[in-house]
Image (tube, rainbow, N blue to C red):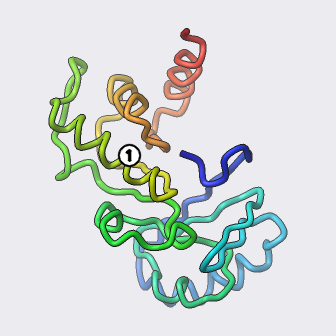
Amino acid sequence: GRIFPGVAEFTLLIDLKQDAAATYDVLGPLLERYRDVLTRFTDTNATPGAVTVILSGSRPIEPVKAAPERWCAIDGRLPDLESNPSPFLMPLVSDSWRPTFGWFTDGGMPAADRTRLEDLVRRAHQQGRRIRFWGLQDQEYVWRELDLAGVDLINTDKLVELRKFLESRKSQP
């Protein structure tokens, strides 16, 4: 589930809020100034750097795709698993939890949702991508289900609690 297996990674998601192309016109040259620490992407390869930048939100897909050498990638959406763009353009797929799935409780998630989630994770991983979801309950029982399904990145506003959860699961046999 990692972009570069065996390499320590720091992923910086930049959430663009408007005018993706104009923002990228400014951001692209700025990122290039930090090329010595950033992951380098081409159409056919990615060379790991200390920081992997992924643009999310209002995504400048075409301008990024057109650059022969780039210092960022694009955050895909669930429909991109169908069209299967290059994982060197979209190494991550992120989407809203709803409407794809329903809410669930500490008693678990519905079996149909669990099956769908496991299928999406499997497909993302087969395509060489990581996967994450936003817009769902920020609770340990949610983190547990996401972790069990193999979701790569877990969104949270509860950093201390998530850290404790992740550390506790590592210490379990």
Location of the C terminus by quadrant is top right
Task: Out of 33 and 111, give the one closest to the viewer.
Answer: 111
Q: What is the x, y in percent for residue 94?
A: 39, 57
Q: Residue furthest top?
A: 173
Task: Out of 117 and 119, give the one closest to the viewer.
Answer: 119
What residue is pinned by disc 1?
121
Marks counted in the figure total: 1
Q: Measuring 53% from the left and 45% from the top, which residue is drawn there?
A: 1
Q: Measuring 25% from the left and 20% from the top, which residue is drawn there?
A: 106
* 83 up-or-down from 26: above or below: above
Q: Does residue 19 appear left or right of residue 78 in this picture?
A: right
Q: Measuring 76% from the left and 61% from the top, which residue is drawn there?
A: 49
Task: Out of 80 and 97, give the one closest to the viewer.
Answer: 80
Q: Residue furthest right?
A: 36
* 39 up-or-down from 22: above or below: above
Q: What is the x, y in percent for residue 91?
A: 52, 62
Q: Secondary structure at mark 1?
A: helix
Q: What is the x, y in percent for residue 165?
A: 50, 21
* 154 up-or-down from 54: above or below: above
| Quadrant housing residue 138 | top left
Q: Measuring 75% from the left and 79% from the top, which residue is drawn there?
A: 32
Q: Amino acid at mark 1?
A: Val
* 110 up-or-down from 42: above or below: above
